[in-house]
């Protein structure tokens, strides 16, 4: 069995500390038919680096936001199963063999994603790192619980049945939380979306999550994260950002990351109170779109 692999890129080669390791882990773990690159007109040698690792590379250049870029990648796949891998993760050993095993056990599974393990010293997740050390629980299990608690998805190391998403329509404006949209689409097709701890991927987080009015606009309009009161969610994140930033300083000695972590949650909270009465909730759900395809 061979599969098409999709990667979204933008000057990915500039993060050389992880990018080549990422490509190597894909080459060593996944039986690839085509490597599909959806590139946002990179100005570095990203395409050349990818081409040095894989012989069958398809380049699609677009300025589309992340959600639409993933849709474009899906529509250019032709295998029964397709795989998304982000450019800042390293797949664990035997990633594909372990992931495909879930589909063999249950035909109603539509997607499997491995929970992330934050790379020590390079991530903005000190609370996860600390919980893992104090509770003796693997970091990917704690991440899995966080994702489940907000009813989210993930596309960092994701394998999908093509028939679950072949006609997927992702709104043009989704530059964030497109993973939730994909998860809900799979579930609207009556398939299961699994978040597992084995296989997993090591995540070299670039910084803090997207913050500010554009992010909050998406949250208000589409209702993400699901299953929580958005105001309370943002307020809790802001309150805990003090301790998180302190942990970043103590554990990783990274003042910039600590400062950015605090201000990202501050801007999100301020943006929420400014926009909460100005953004109209979207009436059409994923199920509406999925039902038409």
Image (cartoon, rainbow, N blue to C red):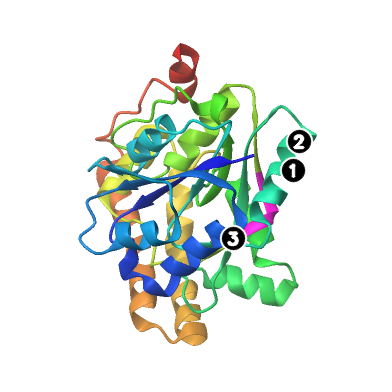
In front: label 3 or label 2: 3
- Choose the circle earlier in sequence order: 1 or 3: 3
Distance between mark 3 and mark 2 Cα atoms: 22 Å
Q: Residue at x 46, y 75 (%)?
A: 122
Q: Residue at x 27, y 64 (%)?
A: 45
Do residues under tags 2 and 1 come within 8 Å of each other at their CB atoms? yes
Residue 47 locus on image (x, y percent): 31, 57
- Look at mark 2 in the image and give the residue it sits on: 104
Image position of 202 (left or right of 139): left
109 and 99: which one is in front? 99
Of helix, strand and loop, which one carries label 2? helix
226 and 204: which one is in front? 204
Q: Residue at x 50, y 27 (%)?
A: 165
- Look at mark 3 in the image and give the residue it sits on: 28
Image position of 34 (left or right of 116): left
Range covered by the magenta-colored residues: 195-200
In front: label 1 or label 3: 3
Of helix, strand and loop, which one carries label 1? helix
Report if residue 273 is visible in the image: no
Residue 85 locus on image (x, y percent): 49, 51
Quarter of the image with the N terminus in it: top right
Do residues under tags 1 and 3 come within 8 Å of each other at their CB atoms? no
Q: Which mark is residue 101?
A: 1
Residue 263 locus on image (x, y percent): 32, 67
Q: Examine the residues drawn in magenta and state their main secondary structure.
A: strand
236 shown above or below 215 = below
Q: Residue at x 76, y 32 (%)?
A: 106
- Choose the circle earlier in sequence order: 3 or 2: 3
109 within the magenta span: no
């Amino acid at each position: 069995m061979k599969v098409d692999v999709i990667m979204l890129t933008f000057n990915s080669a500039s993060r050389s500390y992880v990018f080549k390791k990422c490509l190597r882990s894909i080459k060593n773990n996944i039986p690839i038919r085509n490597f599909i690159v959806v590139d946002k007109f990179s100005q570095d040698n990203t395409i050349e680096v990818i081409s040095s690792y894989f012989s069958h590379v398809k380049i699609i250049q677009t300025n589309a936001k992340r959600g639409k870029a993933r849709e474009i990648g899906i529509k250019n796949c032709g295998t029964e199963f397709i795989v998304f891998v982000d450019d800042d993760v390293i797949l664990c050993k035997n990633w594909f063999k372990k992931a495909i095993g879930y589909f063999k056990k249950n035909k109603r599974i539509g997607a499997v994603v491995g929970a992330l393990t934050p790379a020590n010293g390079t991530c903005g997740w000190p609370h996860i790192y600390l919980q893992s050390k104090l509770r003796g629980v693997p970091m990917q299990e704690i991440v899995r619980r966080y994702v489940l608690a907000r009813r989210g998805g993930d596309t960092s190391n994701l394998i999908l049945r093509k028939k679950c998403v072949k006609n997927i329509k992702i709104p043009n404006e989704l530059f964030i939380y497109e993973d939730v949209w994909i998860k809900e689409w799979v579930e609207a097709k009556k398939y299961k979306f699994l978040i597992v701890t084995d296989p997993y991927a090591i995540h070299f987080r670039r910084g803090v999550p997207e913050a500010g009015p554009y992010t909050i606009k998406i949250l208000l309009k589409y209702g993400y994260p699901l299953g929580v009161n958005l105001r309370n969610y943002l307020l809790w994140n802001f309150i805990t950002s003090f301790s998180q930033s302190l942990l970043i300083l103590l554990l990783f000695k990274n003042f910039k990351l600590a400062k950015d972590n605090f201000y990202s949650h501050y801007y999100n909270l301020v943006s929420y109170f400014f926009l909460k009465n100005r953004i109209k909730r979207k009436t059409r759900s994923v199920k509406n779109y999925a039902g038409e395809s």
